Amino acid sequence: MEYIYSNVLHLGLCCIACVKILQLIFFFFC
């Protein structure tokens, strides 16, 4: 159970990182 939770948390952090990168890309190209 602990293992699954850590995986979900890791995916969540990756998602946040992806969103931040997308925001930077839009900021520079718009």
Image (tube, rainbow, N blue to C red):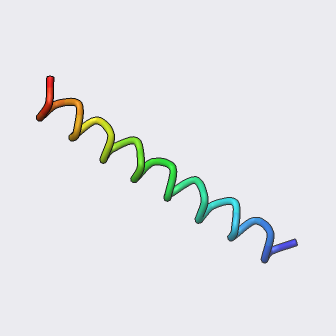
Q: Tell which residue pokes out farthest to the bottom in this image.
A: 3
Q: Quadrant of the N terminus?
A: bottom right
Total tally of numbered discs in the picture: 0
Q: Left or right: 25 with respect to 15?
A: left
Q: Residue at x 50, y 57 (%)?
A: 13
Q: Tell which residue pokes out farthest to the top in this image.
A: 30
Using the image as rendered, state which of residue 19 and residue 10 is in the foreground: 19
Q: Left or right: 13 with respect to 8?
A: left
Q: From the top left corner, tell me how far across and down residue 2 is, in percent.
A: 80, 74
Q: Left or right: 9 with respect to 25?
A: right
* 25 in relation to 11, above or below: above
- Picture quadrant of residue 8: bottom right
Q: From the top left corner, tell me how far across and down residue 4 is, in percent.
A: 80, 69
Using the image as rendered, state which of residue 29 and residue 21 is in the foreground: 29
* 3 in relation to 30, above or below: below
Q: Tell which residue pokes out farthest to the right in this image.
A: 1
Q: Residue at x 45, y 48 (%)?
A: 16
- Picture quadrant of residue 5: bottom right
Q: Quadrant of the C terminus?
A: top left
Q: Residue at x 78, y 77 (%)?
A: 3
Q: From the top left corner, tell me how far across and down residue 7 is, in percent.
A: 69, 68
* 13 in relation to 3, above or below: above
